[in-house]
Amino acid sequence: MKKTLIRNVACYFWGALDMFYIIRYLWIDIVQRRIPLISDVIDFSHMSAEYGGEFYITTMFLLSLVLNVSIVFSAVLLLLRWKKVHVLVYAQIPFRLLLVIPSLSIAPWLLKNFDIHSLFALVFVLIVSELLKMGSFVLATKPCATKS
């Protein structure tokens, strides 16, 4: 029972934060009169044609695109409390660290609103965010000890 409660809270909490990320992403694009994801692809194609599509830039763009799409899936699967969602959550962690997109998606917004522009603060929040997310799912999926 306790394990189920921890899992449900973790799924709803992280799912809500993924939804916040998605809504914020959509809102920023819509306010700028852009089509989410499609405008990113078009902008990238123009930029890569103008400056050259170096392997590193192309790789980072594709990883960012894949992560954004996977966040949509993880938000839905977390809110549905899909049994194997922790696999997707763990798979996202290296991409979130590489692309500096914390799971605590409200954190960059808070840092900006509190006028905190420290790179150290952002990296700290990023690492703590991913440790908290991973830790919550490790606790939620860890097998219960049986009494003999």
Image (spheres, rainbow, N blue to C red):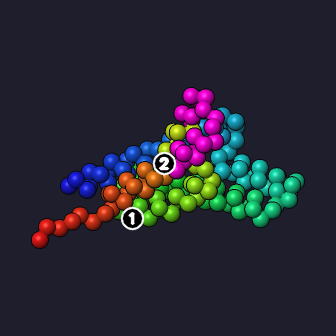
The stretch in magenta equals 109-127
Which residue carries the number 2 mark? 128
Looking at the image, which is closer to me, 84 or 109?
A: 109
Q: Is residue 45 above or below residue 112?
A: below
Q: Is residue 113 above or below residue 25?
A: above
Judged from the image, the secondary structure of the residue bearing numbered disc 1 is loop
**Residue 3 in sight:** yes
Helix, strand or loop: magenta stretch: helix
Q: Which mark is residue 84?
A: 1
- The outermost residue toward the left is 148
In this image, 127 relative to 35: left or right? left
Question: Residue 141 location, x and y as percent?
Answer: 33, 62
Looking at the image, which is closer to me, 38 or 15?
A: 15
Q: The disc labelled 1 sits on which kind of residue?
A: Lys
**Residue 82 in sight:** no
Q: Is residue 143 magenta?
A: no
